[in-house]
Image (cartoon, rainbow, N blue to C red):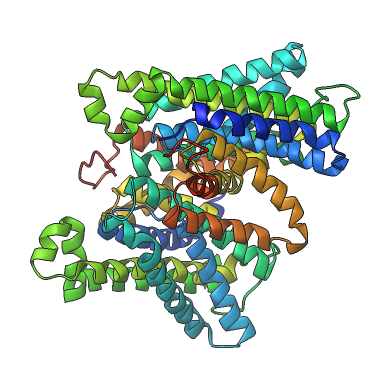
Amino acid sequence: MSLLAISEQALNGLIISTLYALTALGLSIIFGVLRIVNFAHGEIYMLGGYVYFCAASILGLPPLVAVLSAAAVLMAAGAVIERGLIRPVHQGKVDRPDEYAIMITFALSVFLLNLANSVFGPWPQRPAPLFRGRIEIGELIVSGDRLAAAGAGILLIVATVLVLRYTWMGKAVRAISQDRGAAEIFGVDVSRYSMLAFGIGTALAAAAGALIGPVFNVTPVMGVIPVIKAYIIVVLGGLGSIPGAIVGALILGQVESFATVLIPDTSRALAYKDAYGLVVLVLILLFRPQGLFGKRERRA
Amino acid sequence: MSTLFGHRAFLPCIALLAAFAALPVLGLPDYWIYTTTIGFYYAILTASWSLLVGFVGRISFAQTAMAGLGAYSAVLLSQHLGLSILGGMIAGVVIAALVGLAIGWLTLRLHGAYLGLTTIAFAEILRITITAEHGVTKGSLGLQAPALIPDGTRSDYYYLFLAVTVACLLAMALLLRSRVGLFFQAIREDEDGAASLGVRVTLWKTLAFAISSAFAGLAGGLYAHFIQLITPSMMSLQEMGFVLAMAVIGGFHNILFAALGGVGLQFLLEVLREMGEWRLVVFGAVAIVMLRFAPNGVFGLLASVFPSKRNKS
């Protein structure tokens, strides 16, 4: 492989990692506040792609507005999901809440995937690009929509981190993720912020799906692989840890690109591409279940 | 918690078995016999998954992967080692059980979402490996398997699958009615409490995975030699989601209810064929509503309408 090919590969990897990080950040916020893993996160990401497709290609809205509408629509959907399906976990209305939360979000993912399959069909849809044209960096040529997607992704990550760090809302969210009971005593409306956190988490996944939609086409199964990457990332970084999610994304990107280079048989290396991260996931869960940045937690 | 074959449930069970045995004799068309036979495959899968999740409280998303492992092992081993079809299937069950044992042992310390994620990872690694190694497995084109019953009619397979399903359900019911069943439920309710009372938590948690996987492997091996073409899509997470929906809708806290959910939904899927993919949407929605409002499933609801006929949960 030439240097040019390698740097092209690396840049593409970096661009995709940004969007994985965005998806993972959403997963991490949801876990931090609600202590559940949303197994339907990939389908929220996929629906983000479809809302973008409807807004940009069918209604003809400008791409930026279409991305924002994808985030807004799925934020509302996330709030409804939290209200209707997740809240009973925290109100003691279900037997064995951990098991219930896992099973209901997994069932939700089956429902949403088949819903998209029924409404839009299994074939890929190509939404209007975010940004036309190509950008040349020396000899390196990158398509504009990839770069725009990554740029918007970084912007969203930075904005989310700033909101979590400096606003009252962000502080409330972080307080709940540290100690639900104590936050409530200090006057944080826990159930309102749980709904909000779930909504923000789904909005971030939806934005990632909307940004990547024009690059790779939109299909009902588009969320399956990215969400598995997001699981790996949050487990790598420690579930619920925000810096962990970002560092985890960078580590996963490197693991995947290096593992692909290390196997001499290229077609085989590509076929196993999605398995490397999974092996990393299994190893981390077995040897350091709390992740790199996570606090030790025996039950979740 | 009601298990199968409490003495009050004995008569309904016999009636149910008689009804299933009578279906082909009563002139059920070949196509529906075929559909119901596939339903029995799902019945074994949903029952074995419920054994693990509903009774031991160990979440696994690797059940269809175990069925796939059983299927691929059965076909490949009989191809390469010259085993008979039956020998291959037994080998498939053993391999599924051993891999289940390994997963159960490796994930002993993990709970809830962490356990779910690890089993998803195992299932996907297995599926990716089988898809990638097309030199051995023919990848996504699928692997051909010889027929289990040469010149067998549809109803031959139907009765064979019915017999194996009943045998599997009986075995699971006996296991759950023995002391082991109590150990399982004690682990599900309170692991530390169970350990302090002398239940060997580590042993039973590991074995539960192996037992559940062995049944899935058996279902997979049977399925392979019935369908005669297996593809990695039988191990996809989508398929796992489908098994989950079947078990939840039937009622995953009861082995028989879960199994009935498997056969029933497979049958309904074919009846509702003109709805297209919408029927899967409906099943997903029903599964969500059941989980939220009626965790004992459709048959659990029915049983509570006729409380004198079945054990109350």
**Residue A36 screen position, x and y as percent:** 33, 53
All told, the count of numbered labels is 0
Residue A82 occupies which quadrant of the picture? bottom left
Along the line of sight, the residue nearer the viewer: B124 or A143? B124
Residue placed furthest toward the left: A186
* Residue placed most toward the observer, A63 or A58: A58
Q: With A200 as the anchor, is A40 left or right in this view?
A: right
Looking at the picture, how far across and down is residue B135, in whole percent?
73, 30
User: Which of the pair B217/A70 is nearer the observer?
Assistant: B217
Q: Is residue A48 visible?
A: yes
Residue sitting at the far right: B151
Residue at screen point 75% across, 51% down:
B270
Q: Is residue A222 visible?
A: no
Which residue sits at x=64%, y=16%?
B91
Up/down of B113 relative to B214, above or below: below
Q: Quadrant of residue A188?
A: bottom left
Q: Above or below — where is A223 with respect to B123?
A: below
In the image, is residue A206 above or below residue B220?
Answer: below
Residue B26 drawn at (x, y percent) = 85, 38
Residue lying farthest to the front in this orientation: B308
Give the residue drawn at x 42%, y 79%.
Answer: A72
Q: Position of residue B282 (x, y in %)?
A: 61, 61
Which residue is painted at 50% across and 49% down in the image?
B305
From the image, which quarter does the C terminus of chain A lie in?
Answer: top left
